[in-house]
Amino acid sequence: MKISDFISAAIAYDEGDARRIQHFMKVYAFAKAIAEGENVDSRTMEIIEAAAVLHDIGIHECECKYGSCSGKYQEKEGVPVAGKILAKLGADSVLVERVCFLIAHHHTFKGIDSLDWQILVEADFLVNIYEEGLRREAVESIRRKVFITKTGLQMLDNMYLK
């Protein structure tokens, strides 16, 4: 499968919502760059790329059901939407399971125990810090509590702490 298939499907799902599309494309770009910097294997790269594109796919469901797009709601509502998209694209069961796990945990920062999960979280933070206009103190706290990869730390420092 090609990443462009995931991107096209996510854009079609989020049609008319340029802000959300821009967000997932930025997270995808950072996730891919971090993964390359960390020398992940091709299967892990495929998982990271798909998860980065689809990580917020449940936001519209959250807004309709709860009137909120809080992280916990995104984790809950994104899985069924992503599962349908992945199945439609013919993704294998291992890819579907892992991407759905990552979507279900992309706002869970404690207990991260795998490189794909760590990279997705770091990439999302790199984008969210900018989009939310977080202050230096908040960025420093996120750095201490969340970031682990050498590549992610370099990006964070160069973007926000230099």
Image (cartoon, grey):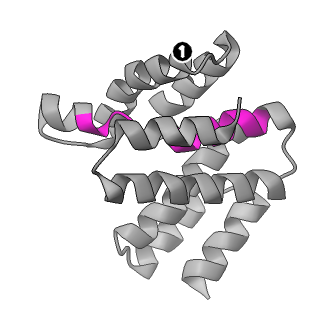
Residue 79, position in %: x, y?
Answer: 43, 23
| The C terminus sits in image quarter | bottom right
Check residue 50 for magenta coloring.
yes
Identify the residue shown where x is 73% and y is 40%. 115
Residue type at tag 1: Ala
| The N terminus sits in image quarter | top right
Is most of the magenta stretch helix, strand or loop?
helix
Which residues are the magenta region?
A: 44-60
Q: Quadrant of residue 69?
A: top left
Q: Is residue 89 above or below residue 38?
A: above
Check residue 110 for magenta coloring.
no
Q: Is residue 5 left or right of residue 153?
A: left
Residue, disc 1: 87
70 or 31: nearer the viewer: 31
Residue 108, visible in the rendered structure:
no
Looking at this rendering, what residue extends furthest in the top direction?
Answer: 93
